[in-house]
Amino acid sequence: MPPRDNTPPVFQRTLLGLAVALAVTAILPPAAHAEPGASSAASARKKYDIGPGTLENALNRFGREAGILLAFPSELVAGLNSAGLRGTYTPQEGLDRLLDGSDLEGFRDTSGKYGLRRVVRPQVTNGETTLPAVRVTAGLAGSDATPGRVNAKRLQRYAANDLEDVFAGQPEVSVGGGHGIAQKIFVRGVEDTLVSVSIDGTVQGNRAFHHAGRLQLEPELISRVEIMPGVVDATAGPGALGGAVRFITKDPEEMLRQGEQAGALVKGEYTSNAEGYKAHTTVFGRLGENWSAMASLTRLDQNDYEDGRGSQVFSTGSVQESSFFKVVGKLTREQTLRLTYDRHDSDGMRNQRPQWVRSSWNPAYPMSSERKTWNAGYTWKSDNPLLDLAANVYQTETHFRQNVIGRWGVYLAEMQSTGFDLRNTSSFSIHRLTYGVDYRKDKVNAGSLANTNEETGKGTVRGFFVQDRIQLADPLHMDIGVRHDRYEVTDDSGNELTASGYSPNIGFSYALTPELVLLAGHSRALRGPGNMDAFKMSVASNAPGLKAEKARSSELGFEFERSRLRFSGKVYDTRIDDAIADPLGNPSRYENVGQLKSRGFLLHAASQWHRLGMAISFHRNLLTLDDEVPNGYAHNGLGISQGNTVTASLDYALNERIDMGWQGRFVRGIDGQSTSIGKIDKPGYGVHDVYARWRPTGSDDYTITLSIRNLFDKDYLDHATTEDFQHIPGYQGVVGSREPGREFRIGLSARF
């Protein structure tokens, strides 16, 4: 009998209340409108993929691709950078997003031409505030509660400290594990080992320990996160079987205000549950006319936290330190160089298998991890539409150390990935053609202090790709592309494994009306055998004839936006053939275990009314491995089952000084899930977070933030955490850490 869902009453009430709220705001009269009679060009929604660079170059390219006349003086945007634009927008929405945070706004005059002007701030005279006449434009392009995107604004509001905080509002992404070292990312139920994960283009391709997460990143450094589940194009990189997740860090130009030469940001935060503190300092400035730089230091020190029952969750405390440096230089008006160094250290007493709770057979030992990443990026965004060059060279190293006192002592794992990506984009006629090559070399070694190279593995992946974005007609847009990858791996036993093949993709977007866009896409991806996780090399092997994994992903969807209301939805199907894993039992061997299938749908609605923003999403996912529903114990490295998930948020700006908000995540329970060792239950839960911010001066000079995570002190086990098997004889201790109970976070920041 299939698993049975049970819906708690609070889940139903929340759905009903938010649906009513969205419906009410949809029929309320708007406060202001853009000019009536917009032409088809002004209302046409198109897909854009504009990379980061100078704001001037981004705007010029946007004007060409949007088919609009956009004119502005160069001095108005001099010295300003853009984080780029990715997604489907009308011209006004795209302008709003490109100009976000620049103190500029885009407008369309009566003749249909577009221009830029400065945003006039309220003036205070004799204690009275005078509001200038402004033009209000409807639209949700700047919303920070959209599936597939996370921005720095939302992370700051909720004082994000780890990956679970980063993705808390994303319905298609779940993060379990309870504490940082154990956290794993699941995209539509598929574990991040099957997803292409990168930081500023630096691919995180190796794994130290299957009982721990493979990525830790300081949220203070994040500018935005782009989530591309399922269907991906050829530029997403090799091995994106379940999609891609891209972390993009902040640039110094994002920190600097217009006309500012230097500045500093100092933050302090106290967390009540784990009795911890966080200190963060960033200094940034211009180094002459064409160069800028920033340096950040962060320290997070916290004890073991308590769950919703008030019980201590052992071995969850840690000390984490992060250092970050970035230099950006304008070599010419069109050419930019970015140099980045990022280091993240984490130390603490962790369970031997951090993924599970402490027990007699899973005691705590000193464990530390260290990640160091170097990255050099170069862009040449020429006025010539045939030349838009981007190059990225990187190296990332991860060191993982565990001291199993009284047994074998210190055991080390070291991983290194070195690679590059070189691509150019040529725009001509109705085409925007991107083509390039990428390369990555991975090295893994593990062993004792006496010999850190007792176990070794190495591999390479070489690829080339072509992706074309074609405007077939005014309402019809097509993406079509292909990449070819070749994998070569030498495992710890000296066996050589190779695989190669093509990964094509195709997608369409059709503007049925100016408000409604229909979407369809299909992609295929190939990933050859890679390095096994470092801690397992001494006991595991690769099965003879191990085949490459091959994914097929299909999606159908729509996007609808009118005035202050937006709806979107999609249905998807991803199938990964010949998935590679080390199944339970002996011998410990990586083999092709079957077809991993992820199917489901997503619905999203958002509304913006005056100073109130609302959003709600519903995600249903069914993950299977052949005919079995995966679980966190038996299917490590593949995926985990997820109950129906609702994410919702409310954000309200009382005035320029005070804003507040709420977000909720509600997951439906799963009863009677069958596993190879017995049935398990996954109880449902609803978790509420709130925040309030006060900026005494009306700007970011001084900010006081109060956020409360898990407001009602819910005691729960996240569905992305290893399930509770303890009721099955012989499996005492096989369960993941419960999530933190109520936690107050009080933060103070000052900007100079």
Image (cartoon, grey):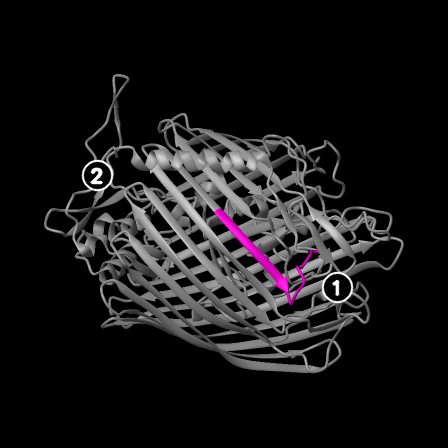
Which residue is the site of mark 1? 535
From the viewer's perspective, tell me whether residue 748 is left or right of residue 734. Answer: left
Kind of residue at badge 2: His
The stretch of residues the image draws in magenta is 618-632
Near-viewer residue (598 or 319): 598
- Residue lying at 82% horizontally and 69% vertically, measured from the top left: 586
Outermost residue on the right side: it is 406
- Residue lying at 64% horizontally and 56% vertically, measured from the top left: 640
Number of numbered discs present?
2
Res. 265 in view: no
The percent coordinates of residue 119 (x first, y second) are 25, 38
Near-viewer residue (666 or 739): 666
Kind of residue at badge 1: Phe
Q: Is residue 495 above or below residue 551?
A: below
User: How far apart are labels 1 and 2 at the CA level?
Assistant: 60 Å
Instruction: Inspect the magenta stretch and tell me whether residue 50 lies in it.
Output: no
- Residue lying at 62% horizontally and 62% vertically, measured from the top left: 624
Instruction: Determine the image quadrant of residue 576.
Output: bottom right
